[in-house]
Image: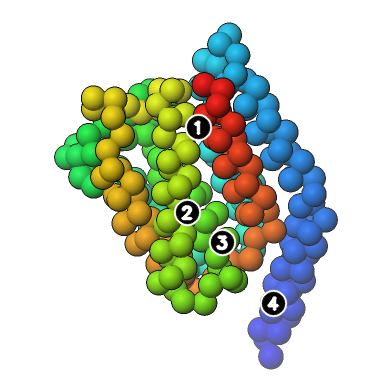
Amino acid sequence: MSYRPLEKSESKIEKAVQGIQEHKSGLFKLIISVFYLVGIIGMSFPVLKPYFQALTPFHLLLSLGILLLFHSDWNRYFMGFSISAYLIGFGSEVLGVHTGFPFGNYEYGSVLGIKLLDVPLMIGVNWLLLVYLTGNLFEKRVDNDFLAAALGAGLMVIIDFIIEPVAIGLEFWSWEGEIIPLSNYMGWFVVAYFIHLIYRRAMFEKKNLISGFLLLNLIIFFAVLNFIL
């Protein structure tokens, strides 16, 4: 009996948060669209480009922040997934930079901010963001965890294919011999597939009102910059 008031209180809080999310989703969709449009414009003009390059880490953090604002189930499984996605993604990049496995031979520039072991800390954020966005897309559409993980990882490879020329042009990273190897995309698929399986098996509510819209804007952003840069 002593737990009922607490349970009712938590239920009211959850409903309040859900209500805010539903009413504010339109506003944040507008913010996302403006944010990415301004980014495209800023990257398009040589005089503004260096300033917008420097803002790239904040761009990633803001995108993740908005995504998490609309995440509702902050249980230990979600925290476990988030930490795992960050560490596995970051760790694979450290391995890649120092050994060439599993992505190929490359190195990071200074644009993405503070580095640890020659890899920007923001790279782990990038892995977490992309796995959440692509995983969320197939969450209700595909029942089989292994198929969903493969589809999510496949979509991440497509996104990486779009991102690569832009990232090189903006000096995020550079490849040995200026050639993007096939191993990059194969490595991306394998690492992404493993993290996607963790996402699928983690027991937390995955509904997110802003995820699909944010993913669409991210893809359009890099696709447009492919033609501009």
Colouring style: rainbow
Q: Which quadrant of the figure has residue 147?
A: bottom left
Query: Which one is earlier in the sequence, the residue at label 3 or at label 4?
Result: 4
Residue density around tag 4, few if under 14, some if 14–19, many if 20 or more, within 10 Å? few
The label nearer to you, 2 versus 3, is 2
Q: Amino acid at mark 1?
A: Pro
Residue density around tag 2, few if under 14, some if 14–19, many if 20 or more, within 10 Å? some
Tag 1 near tag 3, CB within 8 Å: no
Q: Amino acid at mark 2?
A: Leu
Q: CA distance from mark 1 to mark 4?
A: 39 Å
Residue 221 position in % (x across, y down): 59, 35
The label nearer to you, 1 versus 4, is 1
User: Which residue lies under the disc numbered 1?
Assistant: 57
User: Which is more toward the observer, 174 or 5?
Assistant: 174
**Residue at x 66% of width, y 84% of height:** 3
Query: Which residue sits furthest bottom?
Result: 1
Secondary structure under the numbered disc 3 in the rendered image: helix
User: Which residue lies under the disc numbered 3?
Assistant: 136
